[in-house]
Image (tube, grey):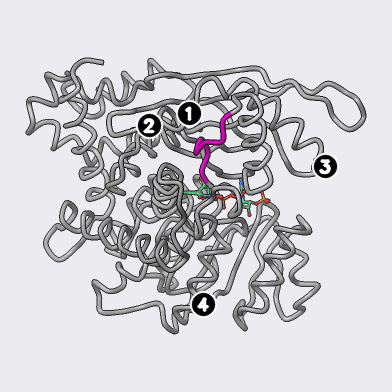
Protein backbone atom coordinates (compact mmCIF):
# COMPACT_ATOMS: atom_id res chain seq x y z
CA UNK A 1 0.00 0.00 0.00
CA UNK A 2 1.34 3.42 -0.93
CA UNK A 3 1.78 5.96 1.86
CA UNK A 4 -0.06 8.73 0.08
CA UNK A 5 -2.39 9.37 -2.82
CA UNK A 6 0.47 11.04 -4.64
CA UNK A 7 2.78 8.05 -4.17
CA UNK A 8 0.06 5.78 -5.56
CA UNK A 9 -0.51 8.11 -8.51
CA UNK A 10 3.22 8.15 -9.27
CA UNK A 11 3.20 4.35 -9.41
CA UNK A 12 0.26 4.44 -11.87
CA UNK A 13 2.11 6.98 -14.02
CA UNK A 14 5.29 4.89 -13.98
CA UNK A 15 3.41 1.74 -15.00
CA UNK A 16 1.34 3.48 -17.69
CA UNK A 17 3.61 6.13 -19.22
CA UNK A 18 2.24 8.43 -21.95
CA UNK A 19 -1.39 7.87 -20.92
CA UNK A 20 -2.02 11.37 -19.62
CA UNK A 21 -5.83 11.31 -19.73
CA UNK A 22 -5.79 8.05 -17.77
CA UNK A 23 -3.48 9.63 -15.17
CA UNK A 24 -5.85 12.60 -14.94
CA UNK A 25 -8.91 10.37 -14.39
CA UNK A 26 -7.13 8.29 -11.71
CA UNK A 27 -5.88 11.45 -10.00
CA UNK A 28 -9.36 12.94 -9.84
CA UNK A 29 -10.85 9.78 -8.35
CA UNK A 30 -7.97 9.33 -5.88
CA UNK A 31 -8.55 12.77 -4.39
CA UNK A 32 -12.04 11.65 -3.33
CA UNK A 33 -11.16 8.06 -2.44
CA UNK A 34 -8.00 8.34 -0.40
CA UNK A 35 -9.78 9.05 2.93
CA UNK A 36 -12.07 6.05 2.26
CA UNK A 37 -9.06 3.81 1.60
CA UNK A 38 -7.21 5.03 4.68
CA UNK A 39 -10.16 4.33 6.94
CA UNK A 40 -10.95 0.88 5.47
CA UNK A 41 -8.12 -1.60 6.03
CA UNK A 42 -10.00 -4.29 4.06
CA UNK A 43 -9.65 -2.21 0.88
CA UNK A 44 -5.92 -1.89 1.62
CA UNK A 45 -5.27 -5.57 2.28
CA UNK A 46 -7.51 -6.51 -0.66
CA UNK A 47 -5.32 -4.25 -2.87
CA UNK A 48 -8.52 -2.83 -4.33
CA UNK A 49 -6.93 0.37 -5.66
CA UNK A 50 -4.07 -1.51 -7.26
CA UNK A 51 -6.53 -3.89 -8.93
CA UNK A 52 -9.13 -1.30 -9.98
CA UNK A 53 -6.66 0.74 -12.04
CA UNK A 54 -5.53 -2.35 -13.94
CA UNK A 55 -7.89 -3.36 -16.80
CA UNK A 56 -9.03 -6.97 -16.62
CA UNK A 57 -8.20 -7.23 -20.30
CA UNK A 58 -7.01 -4.95 -23.12
CA UNK A 59 -7.60 -5.99 -26.71
CA UNK A 60 -5.77 -4.18 -29.53
CA UNK A 61 -6.16 -5.17 -33.13
CA UNK A 62 -5.52 -4.26 -36.76
CA UNK A 63 -8.49 -2.94 -38.77
CA UNK A 64 -7.68 -3.02 -42.50
CA UNK A 65 -10.31 -1.81 -44.97
CA UNK A 66 -10.60 -0.71 -48.59
CA UNK A 67 -11.56 2.90 -49.45
CA UNK A 68 -13.69 4.03 -52.40
CA UNK A 69 -10.61 4.46 -54.60
CA UNK A 70 -9.59 0.83 -54.00
CA UNK A 71 -6.74 1.86 -51.67
CA UNK A 72 -5.98 -0.15 -48.54
CA UNK A 73 -6.33 1.72 -45.23
CA UNK A 74 -5.21 0.49 -41.83
CA UNK A 75 -6.57 1.64 -38.47
CA UNK A 76 -6.14 0.39 -34.94
CA UNK A 77 -9.02 -1.07 -32.94
CA UNK A 78 -9.31 -1.33 -29.13
CA UNK A 79 -11.54 -2.75 -26.46
CA UNK A 80 -10.72 -2.14 -22.80
CA UNK A 81 -12.51 -4.62 -20.53
CA UNK A 82 -11.89 -2.73 -17.33
CA UNK A 83 -13.96 -4.27 -14.55
CA UNK A 84 -16.68 -6.93 -14.44
CA UNK A 85 -17.35 -7.04 -10.69
CA UNK A 86 -20.92 -5.79 -11.12
CA UNK A 87 -21.87 -7.31 -14.46
CA UNK A 88 -20.86 -7.67 -18.11
CA UNK A 89 -18.46 -5.00 -19.38
CA UNK A 90 -20.50 -2.08 -20.69
CA UNK A 91 -19.40 1.13 -22.38
CA UNK A 92 -19.31 2.84 -25.74
CA UNK A 93 -17.18 2.67 -28.86
CA UNK A 94 -15.51 5.90 -30.03
CA UNK A 95 -14.35 6.48 -33.61
CA UNK A 96 -12.18 9.60 -33.68
CA UNK A 97 -8.62 10.28 -34.93
CA UNK A 98 -7.54 11.24 -31.38
CA UNK A 99 -8.36 7.76 -30.00
CA UNK A 100 -5.46 6.01 -28.28
CA UNK A 101 -4.93 3.61 -25.39
CA UNK A 102 -4.74 6.33 -22.71
CA UNK A 103 -7.98 8.01 -23.77
CA UNK A 104 -9.89 4.73 -23.86
CA UNK A 105 -8.46 3.65 -20.50
CA UNK A 106 -9.60 6.92 -18.92
CA UNK A 107 -13.07 6.43 -20.40
CA UNK A 108 -13.24 2.79 -19.29
CA UNK A 109 -12.08 3.71 -15.77
CA UNK A 110 -14.75 6.43 -15.47
CA UNK A 111 -17.32 4.01 -16.85
CA UNK A 112 -16.78 1.56 -13.97
CA UNK A 113 -17.86 4.17 -11.39
CA UNK A 114 -20.63 5.56 -13.57
CA UNK A 115 -22.19 2.17 -14.20
CA UNK A 116 -22.02 1.38 -10.51
CA UNK A 117 -23.94 4.60 -9.76
CA UNK A 118 -26.81 3.63 -12.06
CA UNK A 119 -27.62 0.69 -9.70
CA UNK A 120 -27.94 -1.57 -12.78
CA UNK A 121 -25.80 -4.75 -13.05
CA UNK A 122 -23.11 -3.50 -15.42
CA UNK A 123 -19.32 -3.64 -15.33
CA UNK A 124 -17.21 -1.06 -17.16
CA UNK A 125 -15.49 -1.05 -20.54
CA UNK A 126 -14.78 1.20 -23.51
CA UNK A 127 -13.41 0.78 -27.01
CA UNK A 128 -13.06 2.26 -30.42
CA UNK A 129 -10.64 3.20 -33.14
CA UNK A 130 -8.58 6.08 -34.51
CA UNK A 131 -10.78 5.87 -37.63
CA UNK A 132 -12.41 9.20 -38.57
CA UNK A 133 -15.93 8.76 -40.01
CA UNK A 134 -15.96 12.42 -41.15
CA UNK A 135 -15.78 12.86 -44.93
CA UNK A 136 -16.12 9.11 -45.51
CA UNK A 137 -18.85 7.69 -47.72
CA UNK A 138 -21.50 5.42 -46.18
CA UNK A 139 -19.89 2.47 -47.96
CA UNK A 140 -16.46 3.29 -46.54
CA UNK A 141 -17.93 3.53 -43.04
CA UNK A 142 -19.66 0.18 -43.63
CA UNK A 143 -16.47 -1.54 -44.80
CA UNK A 144 -14.59 -0.16 -41.81
CA UNK A 145 -17.29 -1.31 -39.36
CA UNK A 146 -17.34 -4.77 -40.92
CA UNK A 147 -13.59 -5.12 -40.55
CA UNK A 148 -13.67 -3.77 -36.98
CA UNK A 149 -16.38 -6.22 -35.94
CA UNK A 150 -14.72 -9.16 -37.71
CA UNK A 151 -12.21 -9.09 -34.83
CA UNK A 152 -14.27 -7.59 -31.99
CA UNK A 153 -17.03 -10.20 -32.25
CA UNK A 154 -14.94 -12.88 -30.54
CA UNK A 155 -14.50 -10.76 -27.41
CA UNK A 156 -18.09 -9.55 -26.84
CA UNK A 157 -21.49 -11.10 -26.17
CA UNK A 158 -24.75 -10.32 -24.35
CA UNK A 159 -23.42 -11.78 -21.10
CA UNK A 160 -19.78 -10.82 -21.60
CA UNK A 161 -19.32 -7.34 -23.01
CA UNK A 162 -21.99 -5.10 -24.54
CA UNK A 163 -20.65 -2.02 -26.40
CA UNK A 164 -22.70 1.06 -27.37
CA UNK A 165 -22.01 4.32 -29.25
CA UNK A 166 -19.89 7.33 -28.31
CA UNK A 167 -18.21 10.09 -30.33
CA UNK A 168 -18.38 9.18 -34.04
CA UNK A 169 -20.50 6.08 -33.43
CA UNK A 170 -24.21 6.71 -33.92
CA UNK A 171 -27.13 4.83 -35.44
CA UNK A 172 -25.44 4.29 -38.81
CA UNK A 173 -22.27 2.76 -37.35
CA UNK A 174 -24.15 0.65 -34.78
CA UNK A 175 -26.30 -0.77 -37.60
CA UNK A 176 -23.27 -1.85 -39.61
CA UNK A 177 -21.56 -3.28 -36.51
CA UNK A 178 -24.64 -5.23 -35.46
CA UNK A 179 -25.25 -6.58 -38.96
CA UNK A 180 -21.71 -7.95 -39.10
CA UNK A 181 -21.91 -9.49 -35.61
CA UNK A 182 -25.17 -11.21 -36.53
CA UNK A 183 -23.78 -12.57 -39.78
CA UNK A 184 -20.59 -13.97 -38.23
CA UNK A 185 -22.22 -15.51 -35.15
CA UNK A 186 -25.59 -16.39 -36.68
CA UNK A 187 -27.24 -14.95 -33.57
CA UNK A 188 -29.72 -12.12 -33.20
CA UNK A 189 -28.89 -11.06 -29.69
CA UNK A 190 -28.54 -7.97 -27.49
CA UNK A 191 -24.81 -7.59 -28.01
CA UNK A 192 -24.86 -3.84 -28.70
CA UNK A 193 -27.08 -1.10 -27.29
CA UNK A 194 -28.32 1.98 -29.11
CA UNK A 195 -29.71 -0.31 -31.82
CA UNK A 196 -32.39 0.86 -34.29
CA UNK A 197 -35.90 1.07 -32.87
CA UNK A 198 -37.31 -1.60 -35.15
CA UNK A 199 -34.49 -4.11 -34.51
CA UNK A 200 -34.11 -4.32 -30.75
CA UNK A 201 -33.22 -0.78 -29.72
CA UNK A 202 -34.84 0.86 -26.74
CA UNK A 203 -37.00 3.92 -27.15
CA UNK A 204 -35.30 6.99 -25.61
CA UNK A 205 -31.76 5.51 -25.93
CA UNK A 206 -30.60 8.17 -28.44
CA UNK A 207 -32.08 10.87 -26.21
CA UNK A 208 -31.02 9.34 -22.87
CA UNK A 209 -27.64 10.97 -22.17
CA UNK A 210 -28.86 14.48 -23.00
CA UNK A 211 -32.23 14.07 -21.27
CA UNK A 212 -30.59 12.46 -18.23
CA UNK A 213 -28.10 15.33 -18.01
CA UNK A 214 -30.91 17.86 -17.89
CA UNK A 215 -32.91 15.84 -15.34
CA UNK A 216 -29.77 15.78 -13.19
CA UNK A 217 -29.28 19.53 -13.66
CA UNK A 218 -32.86 20.16 -12.55
CA UNK A 219 -32.21 18.05 -9.44
CA UNK A 220 -29.09 20.09 -8.67
CA UNK A 221 -30.93 23.38 -9.14
CA UNK A 222 -33.74 21.99 -6.98
CA UNK A 223 -31.37 21.83 -3.99
CA UNK A 224 -31.33 25.63 -4.21
CA UNK A 225 -35.09 25.84 -4.84
CA UNK A 226 -34.36 26.89 -8.40
CA UNK A 227 -34.97 25.45 -11.89
CA UNK A 228 -33.93 25.85 -15.52
CA UNK A 229 -36.92 28.03 -16.33
CA UNK A 230 -35.73 31.35 -17.74
CA UNK A 231 -32.02 30.48 -17.35
CA UNK A 232 -29.37 31.39 -19.91
CA UNK A 233 -27.76 28.09 -20.91
CA UNK A 234 -24.53 27.39 -22.80
CA UNK A 235 -24.15 24.02 -24.53
CA UNK A 236 -20.96 22.88 -26.25
CA UNK A 237 -20.94 20.26 -28.99
CA UNK A 238 -23.72 19.66 -31.49
CA UNK A 239 -23.75 15.87 -31.59
CA UNK A 240 -25.96 13.32 -29.90
CA UNK A 241 -25.60 14.49 -26.31
CA UNK A 242 -25.74 18.21 -27.09
CA UNK A 243 -28.84 17.91 -29.30
CA UNK A 244 -30.98 16.06 -26.80
CA UNK A 245 -29.73 18.12 -23.87
CA UNK A 246 -30.88 21.15 -25.87
CA UNK A 247 -34.27 19.55 -26.53
CA UNK A 248 -34.86 18.96 -22.81
CA UNK A 249 -33.57 22.40 -21.75
CA UNK A 250 -36.18 23.93 -24.07
CA UNK A 251 -38.89 21.75 -22.51
CA UNK A 252 -37.92 23.05 -19.07
CA UNK A 253 -38.06 26.67 -20.29
CA UNK A 254 -34.32 27.45 -20.52
CA UNK A 255 -32.84 29.74 -23.16
CA UNK A 256 -30.04 28.11 -25.19
CA UNK A 257 -27.41 30.54 -26.43
CA UNK A 258 -24.70 28.36 -27.94
CA UNK A 259 -23.80 25.12 -29.71
CA UNK A 260 -20.38 24.24 -31.12
CA UNK A 261 -18.21 21.75 -32.94
CA UNK A 262 -14.48 21.32 -33.34
CA UNK A 263 -14.33 24.36 -35.68
CA UNK A 264 -16.02 26.87 -33.38
CA UNK A 265 -19.12 28.12 -31.57
CA UNK A 266 -22.35 29.71 -32.73
CA UNK A 267 -23.89 32.30 -30.40
CA UNK A 268 -27.56 33.18 -30.79
CA UNK A 269 -28.67 35.82 -28.28
CA UNK A 270 -32.29 35.39 -29.43
CA UNK A 271 -32.09 31.79 -28.23
CA UNK A 272 -31.97 28.51 -30.15
CA UNK A 273 -35.66 27.62 -30.17
CA UNK A 274 -37.40 24.39 -31.25
CA UNK A 275 -37.47 25.28 -34.95
CA UNK A 276 -33.79 26.23 -34.96
CA UNK A 277 -32.89 23.06 -33.08
CA UNK A 278 -34.80 20.97 -35.64
CA UNK A 279 -32.75 22.68 -38.34
CA UNK A 280 -29.50 21.86 -36.46
CA UNK A 281 -30.54 18.23 -36.02
CA UNK A 282 -31.19 17.90 -39.72
CA UNK A 283 -27.87 19.63 -40.52
CA UNK A 284 -25.83 17.37 -38.23
CA UNK A 285 -27.65 14.05 -38.54
CA UNK A 286 -28.85 13.97 -42.15
CA UNK A 287 -26.70 16.42 -44.06
CA UNK A 288 -23.59 15.85 -41.88
CA UNK A 289 -22.81 19.59 -42.07
CA UNK A 290 -20.81 21.95 -39.84
CA UNK A 291 -22.31 24.12 -37.10
CA UNK A 292 -20.98 27.35 -38.66
CA UNK A 293 -23.64 26.94 -41.39
CA UNK A 294 -26.14 28.05 -38.70
CA UNK A 295 -25.19 31.72 -39.18
CA UNK A 296 -26.04 31.55 -42.90
CA UNK A 297 -29.48 30.26 -41.97
CA UNK A 298 -29.95 32.57 -38.96
CA UNK A 299 -27.97 35.76 -39.68
CA UNK A 300 -28.76 37.22 -36.23
CA UNK A 301 -26.31 34.69 -34.78
CA UNK A 302 -22.50 34.93 -34.77
CA UNK A 303 -19.80 32.31 -35.29
CA UNK A 304 -16.75 32.36 -33.00
CA UNK A 305 -14.17 30.56 -35.11
CA UNK A 306 -11.91 28.21 -33.14
CA UNK A 307 -13.57 29.20 -29.83
CA UNK A 308 -15.56 27.37 -27.19
CA UNK A 309 -18.75 28.81 -25.72
CA UNK A 310 -17.44 29.72 -22.25
CA UNK A 311 -16.98 33.48 -22.76
CA UNK A 312 -20.74 34.01 -23.23
CA UNK A 313 -22.61 35.23 -20.14
CA UNK A 314 -24.80 32.48 -18.68
CA UNK A 315 -26.43 30.96 -15.61
CA UNK A 316 -25.91 27.30 -16.52
CA UNK A 317 -23.20 25.60 -18.62
CA UNK A 318 -23.49 22.10 -20.10
CA UNK A 319 -20.25 20.91 -21.77
CA UNK A 320 -21.34 18.15 -24.17
CA UNK A 321 -18.45 17.80 -26.66
CA UNK A 322 -15.27 16.14 -25.40
CA UNK A 323 -12.64 15.80 -22.65
CA UNK A 324 -10.68 18.82 -21.35
CA UNK A 325 -12.82 21.38 -23.15
CA UNK A 326 -13.14 23.63 -20.06
CA UNK A 327 -9.82 24.89 -18.70
CA UNK A 328 -9.11 26.80 -15.50
CA UNK A 329 -9.28 30.18 -17.26
CA UNK A 330 -12.62 29.25 -18.86
CA UNK A 331 -13.96 28.27 -15.43
CA UNK A 332 -12.86 31.63 -14.06
CA UNK A 333 -14.61 33.46 -16.91
CA UNK A 334 -17.78 31.43 -16.45
CA UNK A 335 -17.90 32.07 -12.70
CA UNK A 336 -17.01 35.78 -13.06
CA UNK A 337 -19.88 36.10 -15.57
CA UNK A 338 -22.39 34.65 -13.11
CA UNK A 339 -22.53 30.95 -14.05
CA UNK A 340 -23.61 29.10 -10.92
CA UNK A 341 -24.33 25.61 -12.26
CA UNK A 342 -22.23 23.40 -14.53
CA UNK A 343 -23.16 19.82 -15.36
CA UNK A 344 -21.11 17.59 -17.66
CA UNK A 345 -22.71 15.78 -20.59
CA UNK A 346 -19.26 14.91 -21.93
CA UNK A 347 -16.77 12.68 -20.11
CA UNK A 348 -14.11 14.63 -18.16
CA UNK A 349 -14.72 17.92 -20.04
CA UNK A 350 -13.30 19.97 -17.14
CA UNK A 351 -9.58 19.94 -16.44
CA UNK A 352 -8.36 19.70 -12.80
CA UNK A 353 -7.80 23.46 -12.55
CA UNK A 354 -11.38 24.11 -13.68
CA UNK A 355 -12.78 21.63 -11.14
CA UNK A 356 -10.81 23.27 -8.32
CA UNK A 357 -12.26 26.62 -9.29
CA UNK A 358 -15.85 25.32 -9.29
CA UNK A 359 -15.35 23.80 -5.85
CA UNK A 360 -13.69 26.92 -4.48
CA UNK A 361 -16.48 29.15 -5.81
CA UNK A 362 -19.09 26.77 -4.37
CA UNK A 363 -21.12 26.58 -7.59
CA UNK A 364 -23.27 23.55 -8.38
CA UNK A 365 -20.94 21.17 -10.21
CA UNK A 366 -22.22 17.85 -11.60
CA UNK A 367 -19.35 15.61 -12.80
CA UNK A 368 -19.89 13.53 -15.93
CA UNK A 369 -19.83 10.16 -14.24
CA UNK A 370 -23.05 11.12 -12.44
CA UNK A 371 -24.61 13.73 -14.74
CA UNK A 372 -24.23 11.82 -18.02
CA UNK A 373 -25.04 8.35 -16.65
CA UNK A 374 -28.50 8.42 -18.25
CA UNK A 375 -27.14 7.04 -21.52
CA UNK A 376 -25.66 3.92 -20.05
CA UNK A 377 -28.65 3.55 -17.73
CA UNK A 378 -31.01 3.30 -20.70
CA UNK A 379 -28.49 0.97 -22.36
CA UNK A 380 -28.96 -1.21 -19.28
CA UNK A 381 -32.71 -1.00 -19.78
CA UNK A 382 -32.23 -1.97 -23.45
CA UNK A 383 -30.31 -5.08 -22.31
CA UNK A 384 -33.19 -5.99 -19.99
CA UNK A 385 -35.78 -5.54 -22.75
CA UNK A 386 -33.65 -7.64 -25.14
CA UNK A 387 -33.38 -10.46 -22.59
CA UNK A 388 -37.12 -10.37 -21.97
CA UNK A 389 -37.79 -10.01 -25.71
CA UNK A 390 -40.21 -7.14 -25.24
CA UNK A 391 -40.11 -3.37 -25.57
CA UNK A 392 -41.32 -0.80 -23.13
CA UNK A 393 -43.13 2.35 -24.25
CA UNK A 394 -41.39 5.69 -24.56
CA UNK A 395 -43.16 6.95 -21.44
CA UNK A 396 -42.13 3.87 -19.47
CA UNK A 397 -38.43 4.20 -20.37
CA UNK A 398 -38.46 7.95 -19.76
CA UNK A 399 -40.03 7.45 -16.34
CA UNK A 400 -37.33 4.91 -15.42
CA UNK A 401 -34.63 7.27 -16.68
CA UNK A 402 -35.97 10.11 -14.54
CA UNK A 403 -36.12 7.82 -11.54
CA UNK A 404 -32.54 6.63 -12.07
CA UNK A 405 -31.22 10.20 -12.41
CA UNK A 406 -33.13 11.15 -9.26
CA UNK A 407 -31.55 8.22 -7.41
CA UNK A 408 -28.04 8.99 -8.69
CA UNK A 409 -28.50 12.55 -7.50
CA UNK A 410 -29.67 11.34 -4.11
CA UNK A 411 -26.66 9.03 -3.82
CA UNK A 412 -24.27 11.90 -4.66
CA UNK A 413 -25.92 14.05 -2.00
CA UNK A 414 -25.70 11.23 0.56
CA UNK A 415 -21.98 10.66 0.05
CA UNK A 416 -21.01 14.22 -0.92
CA UNK A 417 -22.76 16.47 1.60
CA UNK A 418 -20.19 18.66 3.32
CA UNK A 419 -22.09 21.04 5.60
CA UNK A 420 -24.33 23.17 3.40
CA UNK A 421 -22.31 22.32 0.28
CA UNK A 422 -22.82 19.24 -1.89
CA UNK A 423 -19.54 18.00 -3.33
CA UNK A 424 -20.98 15.91 -6.18
CA UNK A 425 -17.56 14.76 -7.34
CA UNK A 426 -16.73 13.20 -3.96
CA UNK A 427 -20.26 11.84 -3.74
CA UNK A 428 -20.10 10.17 -7.16
CA UNK A 429 -16.59 8.78 -6.74
CA UNK A 430 -17.10 7.37 -3.26
CA UNK A 431 -20.55 5.88 -3.88
CA UNK A 432 -19.49 4.39 -7.23
CA UNK A 433 -16.31 2.96 -5.74
CA UNK A 434 -17.75 1.31 -2.60
CA UNK A 435 -20.14 -0.90 -4.56
CA UNK A 436 -17.46 -2.10 -6.96
CA UNK A 437 -14.84 -2.53 -4.23
CA UNK A 438 -17.16 -4.59 -2.03
CA UNK A 439 -18.10 -6.82 -4.97
CA UNK A 440 -14.41 -7.31 -5.76
CA UNK A 441 -13.71 -8.33 -2.16
CA UNK A 442 -16.65 -10.79 -2.24
CA UNK A 443 -15.37 -12.36 -5.47
CA UNK A 444 -11.83 -13.01 -4.25
CA UNK A 445 -8.53 -12.33 -5.92
CA UNK A 446 -9.46 -12.57 -9.60
P1 LIG B 1 -21.01 12.93 -31.21
O1 LIG B 1 -19.97 12.35 -32.09
O2 LIG B 1 -22.43 12.73 -31.54
O3 LIG B 1 -20.76 14.52 -31.06
C1 LIG B 1 -19.56 15.00 -30.58
C2 LIG B 1 -19.60 16.52 -30.62
O4 LIG B 1 -18.46 17.03 -29.95
C3 LIG B 1 -19.53 17.06 -32.04
O5 LIG B 1 -20.19 18.31 -32.09
C4 LIG B 1 -18.03 17.23 -32.24
O6 LIG B 1 -17.65 18.20 -33.20
C5 LIG B 1 -17.61 17.71 -30.87
N1 LIG B 1 -16.21 17.30 -30.64
C6 LIG B 1 -15.70 16.04 -30.66
N2 LIG B 1 -14.38 16.06 -30.45
C7 LIG B 1 -14.06 17.36 -30.30
C8 LIG B 1 -12.85 18.03 -30.03
N3 LIG B 1 -11.70 17.37 -29.89
N4 LIG B 1 -12.90 19.40 -29.90
C9 LIG B 1 -14.07 20.08 -30.04
N5 LIG B 1 -15.24 19.49 -30.30
C10 LIG B 1 -15.25 18.16 -30.41
O7 LIG B 1 -20.66 12.37 -29.75
P2 LIG B 1 -21.60 12.30 -28.46
O8 LIG B 1 -22.52 13.47 -28.43
O9 LIG B 1 -22.13 10.94 -28.36
O10 LIG B 1 -20.51 12.45 -27.29
C11 LIG B 1 -20.14 13.71 -26.74
C12 LIG B 1 -19.52 13.51 -25.36
O11 LIG B 1 -20.46 12.86 -24.51
C13 LIG B 1 -18.26 12.63 -25.32
O12 LIG B 1 -17.41 13.10 -24.29
C14 LIG B 1 -18.82 11.26 -24.94
O13 LIG B 1 -17.83 10.44 -24.34
C15 LIG B 1 -19.88 11.70 -23.93
N6 LIG B 1 -20.91 10.71 -23.66
C16 LIG B 1 -21.68 10.21 -24.68
C17 LIG B 1 -22.68 9.30 -24.41
C18 LIG B 1 -23.62 8.81 -25.45
O14 LIG B 1 -24.60 8.14 -25.09
N7 LIG B 1 -23.42 9.11 -26.72
C19 LIG B 1 -22.88 8.77 -23.03
C20 LIG B 1 -22.07 9.45 -22.03
C21 LIG B 1 -21.12 10.35 -22.36
P3 LIG B 1 -17.05 17.69 -34.61
O15 LIG B 1 -18.22 17.17 -35.36
O16 LIG B 1 -16.43 18.90 -35.20
O17 LIG B 1 -16.03 16.62 -34.27
Q: Which mark is residue 250?
A: 4
Which residues make up the magenta segment? 187-193
Relative to 99, say whether 196 is above or below. Answer: below
For the residue carrying disc 3, how many other residues have a C-alpha within 10 Å: few (<14), some (14-19), or many (20+)? few
N-term-proximal mark, 4 vs 1: 1
Which residue lies under the disc numbered 2?
88
Contact (Cβ within 8 Å) of mark 4 with mark 1? no
Judging from the image, what secondary structure is the residue with disc 4 in? Answer: helix
N-term-proximal mark, 1 vs 2: 2
Q: Looking at the rendering, which quadrant does residue 305 occupy?
A: bottom right
Q: Main secondary structure of the magenta part?
A: loop
Residue 350 in sight in this render: no
Drawn side of residue 212 relative to residue 411, left or right: right
Tell me the residue at 38%/15% (across/down): 15
Contact (Cβ within 8 Å) of mark 1 with mark 2? yes
N-term-proximal mark, 3 vs 1: 3
Residue placed farthest to the front in the image?
Answer: 389
Where residue 242 appears, x then y in whole percent? 55, 60
Where residue 73 appears, x then y in whole percent? 79, 23
**Which numbered mark, 2 or 3, is in the foreground of this view?**
2
Q: Quadrant of the N terminus?
A: top left
Which residue lies under the disc numbered 1?
157
Amino acid sequence: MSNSANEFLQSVIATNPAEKEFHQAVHEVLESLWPVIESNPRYQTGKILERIVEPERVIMFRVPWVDDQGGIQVNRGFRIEMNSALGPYKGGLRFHPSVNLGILKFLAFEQVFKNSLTTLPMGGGKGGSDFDPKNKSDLEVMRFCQSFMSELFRHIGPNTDVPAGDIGVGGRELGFLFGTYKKITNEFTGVLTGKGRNWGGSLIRPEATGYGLVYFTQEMLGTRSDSLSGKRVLISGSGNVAQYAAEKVLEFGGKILTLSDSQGTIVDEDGIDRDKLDWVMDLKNNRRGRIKEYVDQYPGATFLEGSRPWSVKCDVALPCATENEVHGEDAKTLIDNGCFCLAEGANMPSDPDAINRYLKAGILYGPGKAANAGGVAVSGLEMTQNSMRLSWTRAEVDERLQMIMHEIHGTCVKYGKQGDFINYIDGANVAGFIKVADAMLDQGVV
